[in-house]
Amino acid sequence: MSRDFWKAFARNRGAVVGLAILALVVLAAVFANLIYPQSPWDMAAMPFQPPLSDDALLGSDTLGRDIAAGIVHGARVSLLIGLSSTAVALLIGVTLGAIAGYHGGVVDDAIMRFTELFQTIPNFVLAVVLVAIFTPSIANITIAIAVVSWPPLARLARGEFMALRSREFVQAAITTGQGTGTIILRQILPNSLSPIIVSASLTVATAILLESSLSFLGLGDPNVMSWGYMIGAARTVIRQAWWMSFFPGIAILLTVLALNLVGEGLNDALNPKLARKGRA
Amino acid sequence: METGSDILLDVRDLTVALPQGAERPNAVENVNLRIARDEILCVVGESGSGKSMTAHAVMGLLPGPHVRVTGGEIAYRGRDILTMGGAEQRGLRGDRIAMIFQEPMTALNPLMRVGDQIEESLKAHSSMEQSYASKAARRARVVELLTDVGLPDPESLRRSYPFRLSGGQRQRVMIAMALALEPDILIADEPTTALDVTTQKQILGLIRTIQAERRMGVMFITHDFGVVAEIATNVAVMQHGRCVEAGPAAQVLNQPRHPYTRQLIAAVPHYIEHRGDFLKRGDALLTAEKVRKVFHLGGGLFRKGRELVAGDDISLTIHPGETLGVVGESGSGKSTLGRCIVGLNKTDGGRILFQGQDLAALSRNQFRPVRKDIQMIFQDPYASLNPRHKVADIIAQGPVAFGESRSKATARARELLRLVGLPESAADRYPHEFSGGQRQRISIARALALEPKLIIADEPVSALDVSVQRQVLDLLEDIRHRFGLAMLFITHDLRVAAQVCDTIAVMQRGKVVEMNTAREVFQNPQHAYTRTLLDAIPGKGWEIPEELRTGTAGLAGRGAVA
Amino acid sequence: MAAIASFLGRRLIKSVFILFAIVVINFMLVRAAPGDPAMVMAGEAGAADQQYVEQLREQFGLNRPIHEQLGIYLADVATGDLGYSYRQQRPVWDLIGERLPPTLVLTGFAFVLALTAGVLLGTLAAMRAGTWSDSAITVLALLSYATPIYWVGLMLILLFSVQLGWLPAFGYETVGGGYEGWDRVTDIGAHLILPVVTLGLFYMAVYARLTRASILEVRDMDFVKTARAKGLTEARIVFRHVLRNAILPVITFAGIQAGHLIGGSILIETVFAWPGIGRLAFDAVLQRDYQVLLGIFFVTSVMVIVFNIVTDLVYSLVDPRIEVA
């Protein structure tokens, strides 16, 4: 099973590249303190040093902070918030979606109206409002992103549960006397997992983009260096110092791209039939 | 009209290659077929025989770049279609050679009015047919065609969207579309397989009539020898991409030569006259009294949906050891009844007495102990087994849920696999490694694992090819005798019911209209609807050759594994 | 026709419920904003004596039970009163109303660009599935998907404005340009190009991917085989049969994505100093002007609802089956 999985995954070359990039980002995040032991907030060079200067590989910013150090340390908050907010969104979304899809009827209707409400609200505006009102901190940003990210996951989980629930093997499980818990955990969940995993990988990507957008607007946690903050701070000096916003942007682009590629690879490996159709 | 040779289509040594890695190199191999004017050629075969591929090759509709013709020729009136240019081929399609398909529900564009879809055909070929250059002429022709295929009120029907039409009506629209330019050849790819029997009879009649009126050549693809007997002038039998036998209908049907043809004909389900009547002993095992079930569709929190009455006053009884066939067309409520009995649907009225206990009154939890006694076999062998569980687990899950130890249940699962004709090693494999027939055997083993008293079999063989169908029916017959099981056998096919059932209940619009012994239902039907159904059985005028008829079901084919 | 009316009627009723729920959420957020609202208001107004705070409490009904306060709030919103910004010393609705037109222009153009270009590219990619141009479009879509739009905006400014000097980078029109009539329109048009392209690019990628996938799925459907069997030309099959059916999920998705588009405009307006409600939101964030922020939250939600009604209308015109949906 897992051997087939890797074979199918590796067949998608983009996915392998994505996985490699992602591994680099993770390494940077984990070993940030070893690569750049100094705080990324400290002045490391003269301000406005262009890239490839002696004391700053990717240049320095308006206050003489090392851009490269900022990028390496920024990987931490991006990954942390990306993963934790997706975890929270999965918890909310899959739970609600599973309940709606399994029970159907009025319960489903109520949950779906609720989901629709959250889908109607412009999600980024809500995230901005939430973070602004509850003050920017890693926990609040995580929650705000989760609050605006769960509806698509809920819809997906609901669709899967609804389709699987009426599948004959689930009906057979009911007629052979298996309990509701067993049916959900043993029969339905394993079969609905692969689209949810694929979707979750894309949710991490979107969450990283959302986090960067919030910090771009100055709504990031003021205690941690983040890519969006770096671009936001450099915005007004774009004419004089392109590198200050260019490199953090590339960092976001590569990370999000890598996650998307990995997501597609997972899709190919986990849903072989669908993938073939999409490619044809 | 033509005076010389009346051969319209001559397929010579046709070979269609499959993409690499497929289970065999060619979908169709060296096939020769001929269709003359005024003739219906039936191409018969089971799934994967290449019959449909042959038809698609003639139409130039083979899927994608990987499936393509690699040898032979397809001559239309002496000219090879395969060497024609794209535009010329397109000119033939829909004009001289037309085609209708199996699934009327999906064969029409859902967003276009049916009249426009027919008109489109006229317009596409209007450069050749000057008579349809004007819009008014095309419109008149559409109405004429809709009238010809027997659709009511063609003037308003032409403005309808497909979703408003029934399956039979849609198939008529497809036929009207195919006839638009008076083609020489009509290719019909299983055009009645998705339809109810009574509708099938009408469509077959329609195809025969228009074929005779317009002196067309028809290539009719089917898996059903009953349909062949009903409609064919000539027959070609296909197996694994090859044509194994061809000849005039009377000859192939009554003196089949090739062993495969003989096997197919022997597998055609039919009523067995000298089957003994079932003797009812003791109390009824299950009695349904005025069962009612209404589905609510499309409703929500704030909106009331439509109501669909699926079961309305269903009453019947089953005795221990009896096989009761519930026969009806789609929407008759037969499956709903089965699902109500096993507790998958809640009833809206009436009683279901099982060994004196009213199942309809039980709550979900109260129902659980009863589940041991009533098991179900489902229709779709591909959807009824969890793809992520091993076969042993699938069979053992029921007993484990009722407190059996896992090791005991697994050991029993292996025994059951042998009983249903599968090797014990099947236990450690996953469902996708098995064929449809084998999966249905696994389903049967799962149902038997709880040692039930009653089995509800919901169309257990309708997704299977005839030869496999026969083997599974034999297996069911065998186990019910061995375990003294009662069975509620739900089917749309009277022939199948005739073969395995002691008693038959005929259902129509949520009611049982007639219930009697199989013999009485067949030889002395009381209700008009039963007579309509019997009359609609395809090939009822054809007697299966004596030497291929089986005295009792259960003897032929036993031991062979699907 | 009656079917369409009843379908739209149902959607309208649903929209009213959603609107109500949004107002309630908004009310709860107002309550959740840090500090005693009266104190905050007094603080924002620059006066903090106890008597003034009490007066404010009385004036805004802050000393009444919560459900009464909600009632007052609902009545206020219904009459277009979205509160008062003490920082700017103006009613919130006036601030927003003034900034709304530029935002509508920006998002409207971006949406049209994204939809047409996206559907076109998606169709092209699907028709040439597996070829060089398909891969190019797919890669472009993937890249646009992964790039933060505000960064794309900055990079476009760098290229077209700073390096090449072709296009203006900031604002709605040339300040002090004194253009009149047609000249003013072209001037605004030139200012529009970069923000519209930036905002549109991301959604173009989304629609292109969706269209491609949808076409590939529809292409295998039975009715397309029917169309081919009729002897139709490939072009007619694609436009009359495939594309019309493939566009349905794109319309649905466009409705769902409307909120994202408006959210994106906050970022774009910040980058391009576009004087719309996005820019207003950014300033409100900087000044922690919660009244304005919540007003924007409400107004953008209403915009999404209106947009959804429009997409429902379009959908009902394309798909005759809505009455059974």
Image (cartoon, helix red, strand yellow):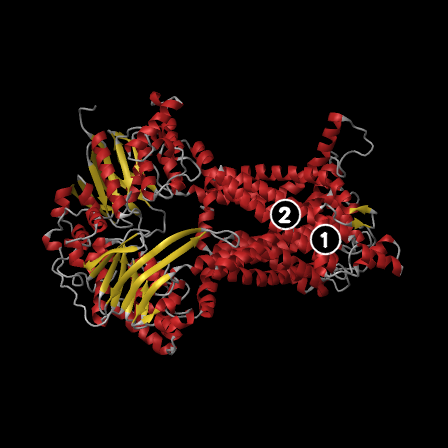
Amino acid type, mark 2 = Gly
Q: Which numbered disc covers residue A45?
A: none
B79 relative position to A155: left or right: left
Determine if residue A233 is in view: no
Q: Secondary structure at mark 1?
A: helix
Q: Amino acid at mark 1?
A: Tyr
Q: Say if labels 2 and 1 share a chain.
A: yes
C235, above or below B348, in the image: above
The answer to which of marks 2 and 1 sits earlier in the sequence is: 1
Residue for badge 2:
C259
Residue visible at 63% across and 42% down in the picture: C201
| Chain letter of the residue carrying label 2 | C
- Secondary structure type for disc 2: helix
Q: Which mark is residue C73?
A: 1
Question: How far apart are the alpha carbons under marks 2 and 1?
Answer: 24 Å
Q: Decide if residue B500 is on the left or right side of residue B180.
A: left
Please state which of residues B440 and A68 is positioned toward the viewer in this rendering: B440
Return the chain for callout 1: C
- Tell me: A113 left or right of B160: right
In this rendering, which labeled residue sits more in front, label 2 or label 1?
1
Residue B228 occupies which quadrant of the picture?
A: top left
A234 with respect to A190 (left or right): right
**Above or below — where is C163 with respect to C259?**
above
Total labels: the figure holds 2
In the rendered image, residue C48, in percent from the top left (x then y), is placed at 88, 58
From the viewer's side, name the closer residue of C83 and B50: C83
Give the image location of residue C131, x and y in percent: 49, 41
The percent coordinates of residue B520 (x first, y second) are: 16, 57
Residue at figure coordinates x 24%, y 53% from the top left: B493
Residue appearing at x 44%, y 36% in the figure: C241
